[in-house]
Image (cartoon, coloured by chain):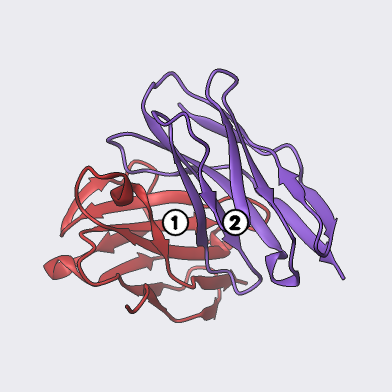
Chain colours: A red, B purple
Amino acid sequence: EAGVAQSPRYKIIEKRQSVAFWCNPISGHATLYWYQQILGQGPKLLIQFQNNGVVDDSQLPKDRFSAERLKGVDSTLKIQPAKLEDSAVYLCASSLPGLAASSYEQYFGPGTRLTVT
Amino acid sequence: AQTVTQSQPEMSVQEAETVTLSCTYDTSESDYYLFWYKQPPSRQMILVIRQEAYKQQNATENRFSVNFQKAAKSFSLKISDSQLGDAAMYFCAYNGAGSYQLTFGKGTKLSVIP
């Protein structure tokens, strides 16, 4: 079974530029998450999708961050314009739908390391 | 809001020995899930073990086991027969039942000494 795919793996941009990250979840996983992981910290949830609808985006800085999940599969996270404090690893994760204990297990992609200079 | 605390920023263990990583959490919920994730230098978060709060029996996955103390809100991870490949950041995470949102601790960096 293929895992969560993310691209690019690395990205370096200047402040005020824009950047986009792509995520393809595990097949059949209806729930998709984007996390921001700043160096030395645990991941922080930015946005959660259930199929192509947003479940929670309360921690997404909406003045500069946007995300979409068209057709309920792939997702794109965009930052425009980027700030120095956006330098972090951006992780995508997915999980099965339902109420079973296994539905609470999230499977992560390899992440994108963003450096803003 | 739920919080997860890992009080050991760094730990080390001799190869083949046993090490225990600590985690405490704060919640007012009665039904929830706890996880340990491993993050090697490659950055990919790998699920190590899951514990359901309604289960009294501690979860075990091969060399990995937990000590879940619900009343004390404590959830430690024991790694037996440590291997070089166990070297990584370990994150404790909490998920309230029905929310599907993980809250992570700050992590513990585990080094394995040959």
Q: Is residue A22 above or below residue B90?
A: below
Q: What residue does disc 1 label?
A: A35
From the viewer's perspective, tell me whether residue B31 is left or right of residue A82: left
Q: Is residue B112 above or below residue B66?
A: below
Which amino acid is tagged 1? Tyr
| Structural crowding at the residue carrying mark 2, measured as other residues with C-alpha within 10 Å and reported as few (<14), some (14–19) or many (≥20) | some
Marks 2/1: CA distance? 10 Å
x%, y% of residue B73? Answer: 57, 24
Name the foreground residue: B104 vs B30: B30
When asked about the image quadrant of residue A108, the answer is bottom left
- Residue visible at 75% across and 57% down? B110
x%, y% of residue A96? Answer: 25, 57
Q: Is residue B18 visible?
A: yes
| Chain under numbered label 1 | A
| Chain under numbered label 2 | A
- Residue visible at 57% across and 35% down? B4
Q: Secondary structure at mark 1?
A: strand
Q: Which mark is residue A38?
A: 2
The C terminus of chain B appears in which quarter of the rendering?
Answer: bottom right
- Residue visible at 74% across and 67% down? B83
